[in-house]
Amino acid sequence: MSQQDYELVATQFSYYSAKVRACLQYKRLPYVELPSNFDTMFNRVLAATGEAKFPVVFCPDGEVLKDSCDIVEALERRHPERPVVPEDGVLHLAAVLLETLSDEFFAAPFIYYRWVPEDTRQWALDFFRLMLTRGIDDPEEKAKAGEISQMVAGGIQDRVRKIGQDRVEMQEESQRLTEMICAAVDRHLAMVDFVLGDRPSLADLALMNGFFGHLYMDPCDASQFIRRHCTHLSLWMMRMHAAAGESDRGELFESDSLRELLTAVARPFESVANGMLNAVDAALVDYEDGAELPPSLGRIDVTLNETSMSVAASPYGAWKLQRLRDVYHGLAEGERKRAGTLLADTGFLPVCHKPLAWRLEKTGLGMRVVKSGARAAAGEG
Ligand SMILES: N[C@@H](CCC(=O)N[C@@H](CS)C(=O)NCC(=O)O)C(=O)O
């Protein structure tokens, strides 16, 4: 029997699922959400994509979509009705900046709440077991799934320690920064219904990744903070989670508080973003045109706000920054000027302006560097 609905492999509590779910919701596409249990992950997701990562979307015509940013782009191409990508180039740039921050940078402070305080850490371990074993009846398979859930959780906790979450200084920075980011978004959403105006757009989908899965859903202090002190953010989150019920009428526009919002949420990550791009640029000198790259090109020391932190110089992170650069370099002259004003204090203009003699291209599971003609392609030649 042929598949009629989209199938979304996700979970309500995952960081990267909320953007794709909100996109399916807002576009009013019929979908079934499959549990990301052992059976689905290994027999469907791993078999189709080569890795046990979600969200993944199985389309009615057999196409398989992965990586939340690519999934939203593909859904927009497949269903241009109720569009999410702003037509205005500068608003598009703002949306992609928020998407890059939410996907690649907010996670470092936000992850504190799930994996550092002991009570939430225990909750997360129980939850991981539930997630992977849910719907599995065979006792042997259930036990195996339970063990794997603890291995996956162990791997995440190792990564969390590596970025410095075992240091009190970093833990305190994470809490300060998270509350500051939540308050900044709340202030903005007190002025406008959605991040870029009257209706949902890619900018709202993007922030759902950062806010919904961990901060809002976990039984943690940040969730209490949002519920008690950020009522506009709470209401917006519920509306985006059930976005099929939102109207697509109204305008997207550059509201008065947008520049303030972008500055507040981007600036603390200036060192991480520029540090990562510079480190990847320096490391790529040693790679030939067309070479496949490892997931990390070494670790670098950066600062998160005022606090020192070590992060991986990841080609994937640089690819995300390249997406932002591509939107910036695609702007017309007048738009470029507006973008310069809007992003002036974000610390992300140097990311857009840095001359690079390479481009990164996704391969099936990894990333490849392309050097020939890269400058011209990036609009810098
Ligand atoms: N860049 C990916 C990240 C997806 C991701 O890391 N998903 C998590 C769950 S929220 C996962 O599957 N982790 C398991 C792993 O990394 O092995 C996206 O935006 O979809």
Image (cartoon, rainbow, N blue to C red):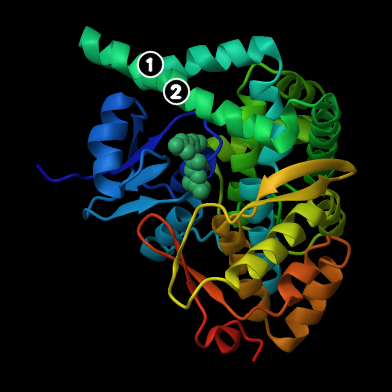
Q: List x then y, in percent, for residue 258.
A: 81, 57
Query: Which numbered circle lies on residue 347?
Result: none
Which residue bears the numbered disc 2?
151
Indicate whether 145 appears above or below 252. above
User: x and y percent of residue 71 in the render?
Assistant: 43, 54
The amino acid pointed to by label 1 is Glu
Q: Residues within 10 Å of mark 2 (few under 14, many from 20)?
A: few
* Residue 13 visible: no
Amino acid bearing label 2: Met
C-beta proximity under 8 Å, tags 1 and 2: yes
The single residue placed furthest to the left in the displayed view is: 1
Q: Residue at x 23, y 7 (%)?
A: 139
Q: Nearer the viewer, residue 174 or 147?
A: 147
Distance from the alpha carbon under mark 1 to that under mark 2: 6 Å
Q: Position of residue 301 (x, y in %)?
A: 77, 49
Of the pair 63 and 174, the residue shown nearer to us:
174
The residue at 76%/27% (across/down) is 226
If the image is split into quadrants, where does the C terminus sit? Answer: bottom right
**Residue 8: percent from left, percent from top:** 36, 40
- Looking at the rendering, which quadrant does residue 182 occupy? top right
Say which residue label 1 marks: 147
- Which image quadrant for residue 147? top left
Side of 346 relative to 24 (left or right): right
**Which quadrant of the view contains residue 352?**
bottom right
Point 46% across, 57% down: residue: 70
